[in-house]
Amino acid sequence: MDYFDLVLEKIFSFENLGIKKMNNGAVLIGAAPHVAQKAFNHGIFKPLESKDIDFLEMENKTSLPKDYIDFLTQKSNGLNYFVGCLSFDGLRKQLGRDEEAAAQPFSLSDTNVWEKPKNAKPEYFFIGGYGYDGSKLYIDKITNKVHYCARRDATSLKEWNNFEEMMISETERIFKLFDDKGVRLVTSKETLPI
């Protein structure tokens, strides 16, 4: 089973709560009125084209790890679990506050250019993070390992052997922390991987 099959299985287990397909290719799954009137638990986004990867590499002033390029171009341009509890960043193609602009991933340039921890090495590529405290996930482009770190400190607090292992592990872990409506069953702090 491909890791993304697990992702889709978990996300679409919320389709009974509603699905909204946006003009930009985003699919929002599982209405979450306990969060906000128009909120959805999960978001997947239309995969990118190779020209978009070129733009991302220019915008972020670095190459993207192959595993993350594959994710962005073959699976989804970012991903959002439980209204930002855990998110994977991508390319934001539109600015604004309307529904279409809101239905996009968080921007890779936010974590790789503007909010990159000062002690991050050049080979660290930040791919997403956790809504509770802004802690981050990054891929070390030399080892291909995925690391979890604090918001402003790139010191590794947890690691996975690769992107696929992290996706499987974190998807299974996060989905156990919410009920079938997307209501959190634990404290916000307990949504973190350590």
Image (cartoon, rainbow, N blue to C red):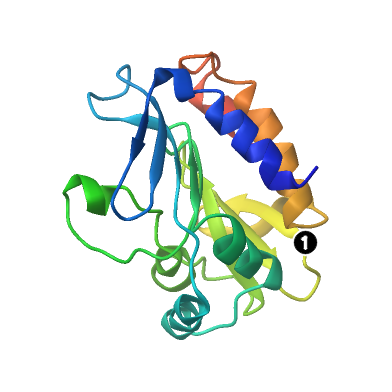
Image quarter where the N terminus lies is top right
Vertically, is 61 above or below 168? below
Vertically, is 20 above or below 114? above
Regarding residue 114, the answer to whether it shows in the image is yes
- The quadrant where residue 125 appears: bottom right
Q: Is residue 91 left or right of residue 150?
A: left
Image location of residue 111, percent across then percent down: 46, 64
Q: Residue at x 70, y 31 (%)?
A: 172
**Element under disc 1:** loop
Image location of residue 35, percent across then percent down: 32, 23
Q: Residue at x 62, y 80 (%)?
A: 122
Q: Is residue 38 left or right of residue 118?
A: left
Q: Residue at x 55, y 19 (%)?
A: 178
Image quarter where the C terminus lies is top right
Vertically, is 121 above or below 1? below
Q: Is residue 18 left or right of residue 69?
A: left
Q: Nearer the viewer, residue 127 or 13?
A: 13
Image location of residue 8, percent across then percent down: 60, 38
Q: Residue at x 41, y 65 (%)?
A: 91
Numbered-mark total: 1
Q: Give the residue type that dot 1 points to.
A: Lys
Image location of residue 94, percent across then percent down: 25, 64
Residue assigned mark 1: 145
Regarding residue 182, the answer to whether it shows in the image is no
Disc 1 crowd, CA 10 A, few/some/many (<14, 14-19, 20+): some
